[in-house]
Image: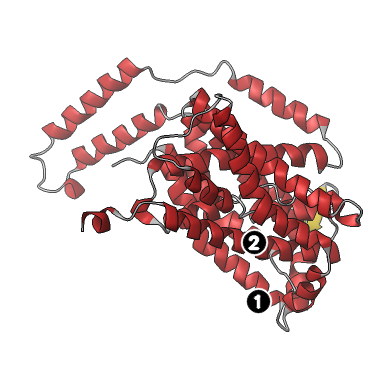
Amino acid sequence: MALTPLEDFVRTSVSGIGLLLLGTLAAVVLANSPLADGYEAFWNANLTIGTAGFGITESLRHWVNDALMALFFFIVGLEIKREVLVGEMRYPRQAALAISAAVGGVAVPALIFALINRDGAGLHGWGIPMATDTAFALGILALLGSRVRPMLLVFLTAFAIVDDLLAVGVIAIFYTETISWGALAIAGVLVALTVPARSWINPSEFLLRSRQLIDDFEAACFVAPSILTNEPQQQATQSLARLAEDVETPMTYFQHRLNPWVAYGILPIFAFANAGIPLVSGLGAALANPVAWGVVAGLVIGKPLGIILFAWLAVRLGIASLPRAITWPHVLGVGWLGGIGFTISLFVTELAFEAGQLADVARVGILFGSVIAGVFGYLVLRQSLPPPRDEAEG
């Protein structure tokens, strides 16, 4: 059975969690081993792309954070667009619930962090606890198996996507030193060129050609006993596959082909480059630094509080409705899963602080806050979700 774009996005994101965890653990182990200096030296080594007269020289970590992660944000943008055009976000009341939850999940953690660090040098990191790591959150939800109702999965995905959109906006507005107007102009022109674009094939033509190819396939049944050795049938199936690609939207095309590269390659590499936390010295410094406490409080307290509070207000005011299969304990559990702020939180840390103690203690806060929030979310959902169908029938 063919997967919907949302199912494909969720499956790929969940499948990549193992590699993401492996990259994270490898970074932490190396950063706390005799190889720590070599680990840092490797990621700080310069790489030049171009020629001596015309090229860009940056550290390997910088290339990962600023070049490879652009594809990650591109995938996020595609999923946001898909949700708005054909996903659950096209329904106003469901969209209002996800948007309200996301706004609360961004505003309250940032406010808590700012209050804890209002008089310190770490105030600039207020954006660190805002974002949700969609892959990790979906992965923990997947551990609950058949107990998870589809609408709960849709709600988590929808608010996490809006959450990411708000986080990207914060990064663009508050954590960007300079704006390249020339690059934006070129991007605008390229986008404008796509406006008059139309599909190469209309529905009637697609159906007609599909039936012709299926007829050709059926007519070739007696050529060979197996489809693997039946050349006319092979040609028919290949033509049908190309025909299906002709009616595939560019959004789906790029999302389907780039998402595995992001989930299985870019995000694990990003984690390996940025999750190297010196726990021996970093943990003691973190306990004494309000930046770490602000991150932990924002993720563990601010996220679930903001999500459930703003969602409740939206329902109470009548601008949104809670789906029938979702209860408020479910929203609380999903809110804690929203406190897993790994990928984008690490990205904002790199933008907010130069390499040094503040960045290190922020990473410690991200690591511990995300783990605590994930455990709380799993336990709440495990307690509040109905038992598996086989247990219920037994």
Residue sitting at 47 percent across and 31 percent down? 88
Element assignment for label 2: helix
Give above or below for 203 relative to 133. Answer: above
Numbered disc 1: secondary structure? helix
Residue 52: % across, % down: 84, 53
Residue 18, position as x, y percentages in the image = 50, 63
Name the residue at the bottom extreme.
34
Q: Residue, x 43% and y 53% (percent of image)?
A: 384
Q: Nearer the viewer, residue 391 or 182?
A: 391
Judge from the rendering whether residue 327 lies leftward or rightward of residue 277; answer left or right.
left
Q: In this view of the protein, which residue sits in the foreground, 309 or 122?
A: 309
Q: Is residue 18 above or below residue 249?
A: below
Image quadrant assignment for residue 177: top right
- Which percent across, then down, holds residue 72? 61, 46
Q: Which amino acid does label 1 sit on?
A: Val
Q: Can residue 309 be seen in this view?
A: yes
Residue indicated by mark 1: 29
Mark 1 Cα shell of 10 Å, populated few (<14), some (14-19), many (≥20): some
Residue at image point 51% right, 26% down? 93
| The label number, if any, that marks residue 129 in the structure image | none
Quadrant including the C terminus: bottom left
- Is residue 68 something one can see in this rendering? no
Q: Position of residue 295 (x, y in %)?
A: 74, 57
279 and 23: which one is in front? 279
Left or right: where 292 falls relative to 195? right
Amino acid type, callout 2? Ala
Mark 2 / mark 1, whichever is N-terminal: 1
Q: Compared with residue 368, is residue 7 higher up or lower down, i.e. above or below?
A: above
Residue highlighted by disc 2: 271
